[in-house]
Amino acid sequence: VQLVESGGGLVQAGASLKVSCGASGATLRNYIMGWFRQAPGKEREFVACIDRTGSITYYGDSVKGRFWISRDNDKNTVDLQMNDLEFEDTAVYYCAANDDFYAIQVTPEKYAWWGQGTQVTVSS
């Protein structure tokens, strides 16, 4: 499974940004998908995950109410819509795939496939 993120960039605090994840050589509907982020000097942090059908989502506390994960299995994509961005949201954002049974997976170790990451920078 090769995952590719896109859509990162530099925005001002309070702005919105959407990052997307696509795949080559794999059908994403077969996987639970997650978004993680990692800021310099910090551990990789869980952001959000979504089950195979898109009916179950789960968010990290720091983004709850501001970020929204969605998927389009026909287009083979998973999106993360980020609203009301804060300086603390600055990080490299990674999408990841998981073929486990349980829909909610918040630890990086549960995800076997990762994209290369896309930088999101929020200026204060």
Image: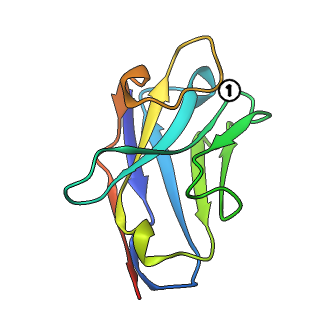
* Residue with the most extreme left position: 41
For residue 53, above or below residue 116: above
Please tell me whether residue 79 is drawn above or below residue 22 in the rendered image: below
**Which residue is pictured at 61% across the width and 77% down the height?**
84
**Residue 6 found in image quarter:** bottom left
State the quadrant of the N terminus: top left
Task: Using the rendered image of the protein, determine whether residue 43 is visible from the camera's viewpoint.
Answer: yes
Count of all numbered marks drawn on residues in the image: 1
Which quarter shows the C terminus?
A: bottom left
- Residue at far right of view: 55
The residue tagged 1 is 52
Residue under the image location 42 percent in, 25 percent down: 111
- State the image coordinates of residue 85 (x, y, percent, origin top left): 54, 75
In the rendering, at what x and y percent does residue 78 appear? Answer: 58, 45
Tell me how the rendering is colored.
rainbow
In the image, residue 7 sits, relative to residue 9, either above or below, namely: above
Front one among 10 and 58? 58
**Percent x, y for residue 113?**
37, 28
Identify the amino acid type marked 1.
Arg
Residue pictured at 60% horizontal, 51% vertical: 61
Residue furthest to the top: 101
Residue 74: tell me if it is visible.
no
Q: Is residue 12 above or below residue 121?
A: below
